[in-house]
Image (cartoon, rainbow, N blue to C red):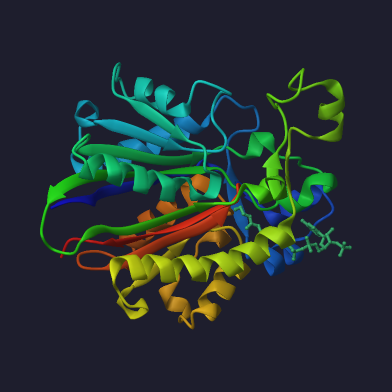
Amino acid sequence: MKKTMIKGTGRYLPARLVTNDELAQWMDTSNEWIIQRTGIEQRYWVPEAGGVGASDLGLEASKIAMDRSGWAPEEIDLIIFATLSPDLFFPGSGCLLAHKLGLSSTPALDIRQQCTGFLYGVATADAYIRSNQAKRVLLVGAEVHSTGLDISTRGRDVAVIFGDGAAAVCLEGMETDIKEGVLSSCLHADGSLAESLMTFAPASRENPRLDENMLKEGRHFPTMDGRNIFKTAVRRLPEVVGESLKKADMPLAAVDLFIPHQANLRINQAFAKALDLPESKVYNNIQRFGNTTAASIPLALDEAVEKGLVGAGSTVMFLGLGAGVTWGAVLYRFAA
Ligand code: UT7
């Protein structure tokens, strides 16, 4: 049976390190508040002058992942690019990345699923691979948040959370009868909560899509009902873990490591508590990178692989909830 396997991973963070104390110079916040409420100690942002888009970060991460997988760009059958911060309003960053990789006809698909972009991306890649429409899929999660944040007291609840960064995963089809590779994926969306976490403008439903008034009100910056998103995550994440395990007919104890989206350390701690998981079974790196949205799960995976926390024979679960709201989980077993 055709299975989707992770061949290699890579990550890339821009060089500009931004500490909580630096943020406190620009808005009414403090290192203590940010650490206590989110766990975040620092994040990386692209140069303030601009000129670096999501596809640029994605390119660097992709080169590392492809190098580790022994892939040449020409061997890629499909690029899936997950981001909420595309280089341009359109076309998608996947097209830009393909061009930067020197490709001129490889299909490229953008996924605009925010924090669950990686989960939707793996599920899509898996469908392409298992239906023999693609053998090698390059899946990238990349975000440049910093150029789109309200870096003032008005936007402090959102601005302190987000970091820039990228990670890439090379996914390849393999014939095997062993229970390995992508074992199950569960995806969900509930648009009734769309306005709990959104960037309003530029909006096609407005004419003009962005005007001076909207700029003045900061409607081009992300806004969030943090408490509502927090509560929804703490309810939905344990639920989708159960659903995903049931689908793969596996017990909770079979999962060696949970790699959740890095939205807030307290969300991941509450999730672990709800399932009675030891902290060592839940991977967190939000302390160092902040919330990198579509990049966060593959970035954490790349670190977990590098640290030897997961590898041959390990079973991992990727999971997350974010804007949409969308949520989901993917259960994966590395080849022994
Ligand atoms: O990845 C996408 C999905 N996103 C998430 O999952 C985010 C989920 N939500 C959260 O992470 C949290 O709700 C936040 C970190 C955004 C906020 O933490 P909270 O504990 O829910 O705080 P809050 O919004 O209830 O605000 C508490 C207080 C408020 O002041 P008052 O009204 O009590 O006087 C805020 O104005 O904290 C204030 N506040 C801040 N103070 C210092 C909000 N942001 C800040 C800040 N620094 N950066």
**Observer able to see residue 82:** yes
Q: Residue at coordinates 29% horizontally, 17% vertically from top-left?
A: 105
* Residue nearest the viewer, comparing 141 with 4: 4
Q: How far across and down, in percent of the image, does residue 160 sit? A: 70, 52
Q: Camera-side residue: 4 or 166? A: 4
Q: Residue at x 36, y 70 (%)?
A: 245
x, y percent for residue 286? 55, 60
Which part of the image, by quadrant, shows the C terminus?
bottom left
In depth, the one of 141 and 17 nearer the eye is 141
Q: How many marks?
A: 0
**Residue 330 placement: quadrant:** bottom left
Horizontal and vertical percent position of residue 202: 70, 26
Q: Name the side, left or right, on which 34 lies relative to 107.
A: right
Residue 168 visible from this viewpoint: no
Question: Image check: 196 left or right of 57?
Answer: right
User: Which residue occupies the foreground of this view, 336 or 284?
Assistant: 336
Q: Give me the residue at 49% from left, 65% from top.
A: 284
Residue 178 against residue 54 in the figure, above or below: below
Left or right: 71, with 28 as reference point: left
Determine the quadrant in which ligand 1 lies. Answer: bottom right
